[in-house]
Amino acid sequence: MNDDYYRPNSESGDPRGAGLRAGDDALRERFAALRREEERRAPEFASLWPGRVRAQRGKTRWLVAAACALTVVAAVLWLRSTRPKPADVSVASLAEWKAPTDFLLETPGRELLRTVPEIGEWRGYTVALPGTRPAPARKKVLH
Amino acid sequence: MDKTDLQGELERLHPASFGWALWCCDYRRDEAEEVLQAAYLKVLEGMARFDGRASVRTWFFSVVRRTAWEQRRRRWVRQSLLGRWLSQQPALAPSPAPDQALSSSEESAALRQVLATLPARQREVLHLVFYQELTIEEAAKVLNLGLGTARTHFERGKARLRGLLGGEKKR
């Protein structure tokens, strides 16, 4: 296959060339007739050039974006309004809590067990003075 | 190339681009207009950028082709999923007949009919070379094919087209 055959043919005065053989002229003629016919029926360039469409698209995009933003804001507000508020019941703090059976632990003499006695002090007892003897305990005689 | 220059160039190319869009949409005029407008929009919004590696025509034709493919895929998905579910229509509705208004001359109508029987790749290469007067190399770029592959499609398509057109004449 000759490669030059496919290159634009400047000698024949055909600027595009397209690598056509002499026998292709008939085909080329038929295609040219088809092209002339279709080009006559082509719509105006201005009617398809989308300058206006583009401007409208730009506007539409902004509108869609604004609508989306509004929807999101409305949804957030609605969700916040419908969310249940925290109950208004005051809960006693754990440090202040007392068990209802605490009184059972109040044993007699509890204070004595809690405190350390100081030396020299003897609370709750009378001091025995030297020379005095406590009276001997008498036996109770039951008659 | 700034936007004004590019717009001027696209305006100059507009009739040829429309022809290519028609081709990519199997001669459905509404679809072709939609595709061409979507392709212009891609250019305007910078989704398709001309980097100067190929000619504006080659670059824009590949944008149109890709856009047509995307639209076709979108339509197929819509028809096969949503359409089937909503209206109980068949997955792929039979494609509507090509725009009859376009086929004013018998010769052109015959050529279109014959071309429709060729494989898509051969059809595309033939269209780009004969109709759009691109070189095979440019056609290969538009179709994202290797040069050798494009040449093969071109030769095979041409031979087949000649045979079919000869058959048409004999009838």
Image: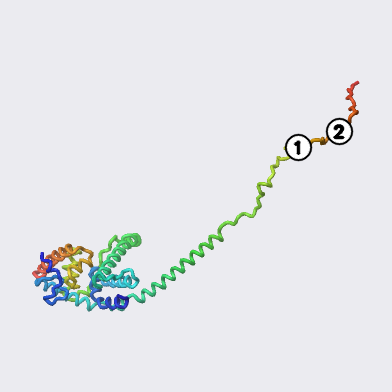
Q: Which mark is residue B94?
A: none
| First along the sequence among labels 1 and 2 | 1
Is any part of residue A13 visible from this angle?
Answer: yes
- The residue pinned by badge 2 equals A127
Local packing at callout 2 (Cα closer than 10 Å; few below 14, some 14-19, many 20+) is few
Residue at image point 21% right, 63% down: B145
Return the residue nearer the eye: A104 or B113: A104
Say which residue label 1 marks: A116
- Relative vertical location of residue B58 with respect to residue A113 in this rendering, above or below: below
Observer-nearest residue: B4 or B124?
B4
Across and down, in percent, residue A72 comes to 49, 64
Question: Which chain is disc 2 placed on?
Answer: A
Left or right: B33 as drawn, with respect to A10: right
Left or right of A97, for residue A28 = left
**B108 with respect to A108 (left or right):** left
Q: Amino acid at mark 1?
A: Val
Q: Please name the amino acid that badge 2 sits on.
A: Val
